[in-house]
Image (cartoon, rainbow, N blue to C red):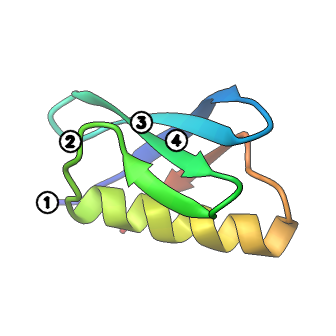
Amino acid sequence: MALCAHVERIYEDEKVVRYQYENSTGERRTLFLDKTTEQLSPESGAEDTLYRAIAMKLASLWVRDGAPPTHFIVQP
């Protein structure tokens, strides 16, 4: 089964960025990027394959661009 996620930034302030995406079952999930610690965490606490792929892509975009992206696509 192929996985694909369209990830969108839904909130940002000085300390945190919140992103939203849908998993393969259509469930909306969110994850947080803590700008101070540069840590990513899922809101639900579940770290599945899709979450890990999104976290890796988000981390690489953060390092490359020096800022959190507004949106991106992941196809692990």
| Secondary structure at numbered mark 1 | loop
1 vs 3, front mark = 3
Can residue 7 be seen from the camera position used here?
yes
Q: Amino acid at mark 3?
A: Tyr
* CB-based contact (under 8 Å), mark 1 and mark 2: yes
Q: Earlier in the sequence, mark 2 or mark 4?
A: 4
What SS does tag 4 mark? strand
Q: CA distance from mark 2 to mark 4?
A: 13 Å
In contact (CB < 8 Å): disc 2 and disc 3: no
Q: Residue at x 23, y 65 (%)?
A: 49
Which quarter of the figure is the C terminus placed in?
A: bottom left
- Residue that appears at 22% across and 28% down: 26
Q: Camera-side residue: 33 or 28?
A: 33
Tell me which numbered mark, 4 or 1, is placed earlier along the sequence.
1
**What's the mark number on residue 7?**
4
> Which residue corresponds to mark 3?
21
Alpha carbon separation for disc pair 3 and 4: 5 Å
Residue plotted at (13% across, 60% down): 1
Picture quadrant where residue 62 is located:
bottom right
User: Picture quarter containing residue 24?
Assistant: top left
What amino acid does circle 4 point to?
Val
Amino acid under disc 1: Met
Q: Viewer-proximal residue, 12 or 20?
A: 12
- Above or below — where is 63 with respect to 5? below
Q: Position of residue 70 (x, y in %)?
A: 73, 40
Q: Which residue is identified by label 1? A: 1
Specify which label sits upstream in the sequence, 3 or 4: 4
